[in-house]
Amino acid sequence: MKWTRRDLLIGLGGLPILGAVWWAGAANTVGSRRKRSEILEQLNITPSLPPAVPGIGGEPVRIGIIGFGIRGEQLCRALGFATEDWKEQMRLAAQEDPNNHAFEDFMGQEKLNVKLVGICDVFDVRAENFIDSFSTPENPIKRYTTYKDMIGSGDVDAVVIATPDHWHAPISIEALNHNVHVYVEKPMTHTVGETYLLRDAAKNSKAVLAVGHQHRQTLSFSTAKDIVEKGTLGHVSLIQTNTNRNDDNGAWNYDIHEKASPETIDWEQFLGSAPKVPFNKNHFFRWRKWWAYGSGLSGDLLTHDYDRLNCVLHMGIPSSVSASGGIYTHNDGRNVPDVIQVNMEFPDYSTGSSQAKGKEKGMTFCYSATLGNGFNRPTILMGHDATMELGNKLTIWPDGASTRYAEMIEAGKMNPGVPIYQYNPAANVPDAISSATSQYFADKGLMWTYIDGVRVDSTFLHMREWLSVIKNGGKVSCGINEGFEEAISAHMAGLSWKLGRKIEWDPNTEMLKPIEGIDFDEVLLANGTWDVKPEMVG
Amino acid sequence: MDQNQNKLKVSVTLLRILIGWHFLFEGVVKLYNPEWTSFGYLATAQGPFKWFFTMLVGDATIGWVDTLNIIALMVVGITFTLGIFEKVGAFVGMGLLALYFFAHPPFPGLTQLNVEGSYWFVNKNLIELVACLVIYQLPTGQYFGLEYLRKNKLTKMQEQ
């Protein structure tokens, strides 16, 4: 037989098309992968591995819970104890939305070697709920009327403190003085004075104190630390962090329990050092809205952002803080601001420089918050060489005028509009997040981290680390020094807002620079008018 | 031969080659990128068959799903560009496109993810699916493609 040229043209005409398309696809893919790996090689970023902690062996740690409200329940779940109510709710939620893994995650959580032995809550309903949920004939749980009874009983090795802010330090100090280990929620203290007292107590105690900044366990933050230390961003001169929430829960207008009454709530004990106002359910359940019990945006939410960055950058206490804002979106009797801008100055701080020595130094940390808008503004670290968005995901864009990347940008290997690095451990995990407030915390990397693609509650990791240090010694990632820096910085922001002036820190004396005629702690508690009058808090 | 018949053959051949080109490129790009996975596409599936696509994203299945997807894309791409066994290619192509269509159907009330146009029940996946149906019914490999050689030359060789 004979194949004519026509036969070949008709029969094999598709071959060159196939070859061309194949070549183009392969060259394109391989080329862009090579370009990427060249960039990655230059950046040399090492994603962090999960923290390995020695096991919690021996006798179970006997834990007393002080405060079983919203956060107290969450902390108990991190310890492995969930109420039946919650389990039922999550079972229903999972039926409604198969992507809701809260129940499954909880059931799959590693069991910690702990025993709940006591509860202290001034609201009967919560204390009874705790006992009903966790007390068993083999392991009966005792209710203590006061935290002093619990700490002095000798029956608890450790306490978890999830009370309003004004109780954090007094309870922590009492526990530390009795060598009872402490896990305390943030902010660590309610006043400047308490911060020093608690630091002394922690230093003199044999017990381990951990402050509840669970995000220190988030892998993206330890990866971010590596990124900054390697000079990837160059000199960071500005950090922008934000809070944007626009719902009742986010504005601390929590539900008021129907059974709340002077008979079911030990009001005197709740008040503690706070001004003696008559029984008020609003104050009890929504205490975050008043300086007498809470610390507003600066203590409640700024602390998260500050500590998130402090664990990445170790910038410490700012040399000065100025804040402004007001009650602009929830004029409902609260006296803490719901819109605030805080500028923290770190004039001597540097993340390293790619330019002439001495040209770059100093950084501003800018926190901008509103409870009247839910638009997501990410946390951004702005360096001379690159910009990093920090959350559970990390994204880095090179800067068009970067010194370090000038050659690569010139050669077209980098483009200021295209990220040079992305870290997204959650890329393969579909999430369902139930509320706007949870979404807010999740985006910031405050709720969970991802280990080998599996979602893990960061509070669980944080508590596990604390328990491990109790048993094996070592250092917790958010101890008294980190807590001290967090608390002082937050108080400086609160003071600045109240006084409408700059608050300065003296690193040599480790004190706030005094302002004549002003007692800082009176200002903090009494919202700018230094006489503590009951009407100030109502 | 009828003039119109000829025009139709040329048009369908062109259609076949372009669809083949499209599938082949998609397949090759995925083949050469070991990091590629259909996970995100499947995990965000919507509509009445969401349960089915969500089922595919398990640890045990996703690797197979990815491999089969690449193989299917390449089968369509190769058969269509070379013009041989196009009926098999068209059949595989229709199946694949039906899956893509139902994973993210352009039905009212569903959020359209990563789409560049506006669609209501009909989108480009569906149109390409019907185009594959045309290829299935009007194979053109014997006019332009390996099928021509197989049909004409090999059979003739046997006859000789």
Image (tube, coloured by chain):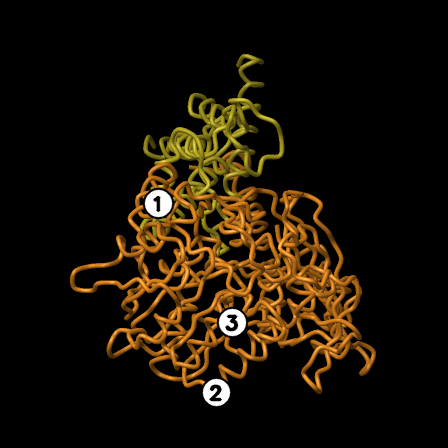
Chain colours: A orange, B yellow
Q: Tell me if A380 is positioned left or right of B49 in this view.
A: right
Pointer 3: what residue? Answer: A169
Q: Position of residue A253 (x, y in %)?
A: 54, 45
Q: Is residue A389 above or below residue A155?
A: above
Q: Earlier in the sequence, mark 3 or mark 1?
A: 1
Q: Tell me if B128 is positioned left or right of A41 in this view.
A: left
Q: In the image, what residue occupies the spot 78% across and 61% down? A: A500
Query: For residue A397, what is the image quadrant?
Result: bottom right
Pick whichever, A195 or A217, lies toward us.
A195
**Quarter holding the N terminus of chain A?**
top left
Q: In the image, what residue occupies the spot 39% across and 53% down? A: A123
Say which of marks 3 and 1 sits in front.
3
Query: For residue A108, what is the image quadrant?
Result: bottom left
Pointer 1: what residue? Answer: A90
In contact (CB < 8 Å): disc 3 and disc 1 = no
Query: Which label belongs to residue A204?
Result: 2
Q: Tag 2, which chain?
A: A
In contact (CB < 8 Å): disc 2 and disc 1 = no
Q: Is residue A99 above or below residue B4?
A: below
